[in-house]
Amino acid sequence: MKRLCRHFYKKEKGFTLVELMIVIIILAVLTGIAIPSYMTLRNRAREAATESEMKNIATALELYMTDNEEYPDDYTTITDYMSPVPTTDKWDNAYVYACDDPYSTYTLTSWGADGVATGTDNIVFANGQMTADGAY
């Protein structure tokens, strides 16, 4: 009976403060490693989706050019070739469309993750071809 009572009343119950602190530190280090990797992968996925969407817009613009012998002055008017026509990239920045005066060339630009026109992560399509492919 004594032996049974000793088993129930052991003094070592639970974890010590040092053991809990070590576990918390390990979790913090693992989180510090995982978050930057996740952010990079998320931006790569957004860039790939934006490039794909811009390629579809460029294809619709080329079809418009074939039928009308000029590019439109506003790319959102190509609803006969693509519906709905996206107006923002995957970072919620507006696409920038520029067409020259005789409507024979155009550029379609996404400012990328930083949303800055002078950034190094811009994605640019000109006359159906990708001319700048972003940061990744």
Image: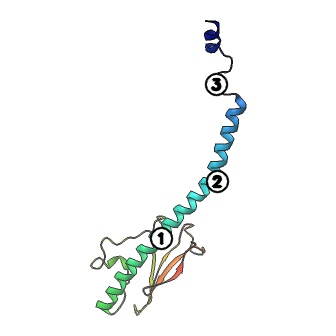
Disc 3 on helix, strand or loop? loop
x and y, in percent, of residue 24 in the image = 66, 39
Type of amino acid at the residue the image marks with label 2 = Ile
Tell me where residue 28 sits by quadrant. top right
N-term mark: 3 or 1 = 3
Question: On the picture, is 23 further left or further right than 69?
Answer: right
Judge whether 75 appears above or below 7 on screen: below
Mark 2 or mark 1, whichever is nearer to me: 2
Please rate how many residues cluster around mark 3, counting C-alpha atoms within 10 Å: few if below 14, some from 14 to 19, many from 20: few
Disc 2 on helix, strand or loop? helix
Which residue is denoted by mark 2 in the rendering? Answer: 33
Tell me where residue 100 sits by quadrant. bottom left
Which residue is denoted by mark 1 in the rendering? Answer: 48
Question: On the picture, is 65 further left or further right than 110?
Answer: left
Which residue is denoted by mark 3 in the rendering? Answer: 14
- Marks 2 and 1 close (CB-CB < 8 Å): no
Mark 3 or mark 1, whichever is nearer to me: 3
Numbered-mark total:
3
In the image, what residue occupies the spot 34% across and 72% down?
85
Which quadrant of the rendered structure holds the N terminus? top right
In the image, what residue occupies the spot 34% across and 89% down?
65
x and y, in percent, of residue 32 in the image = 65, 51
C-alpha gap between disc 3 and disc 1: 49 Å
N-term mark: 2 or 1 = 2
Question: Would you say residue 94 is visible in this rendering?
Answer: no
Type of amino acid at the residue the image marks with label 1 = Ala
In the image, what residue occupies the spot 43% across and 90% down?
105
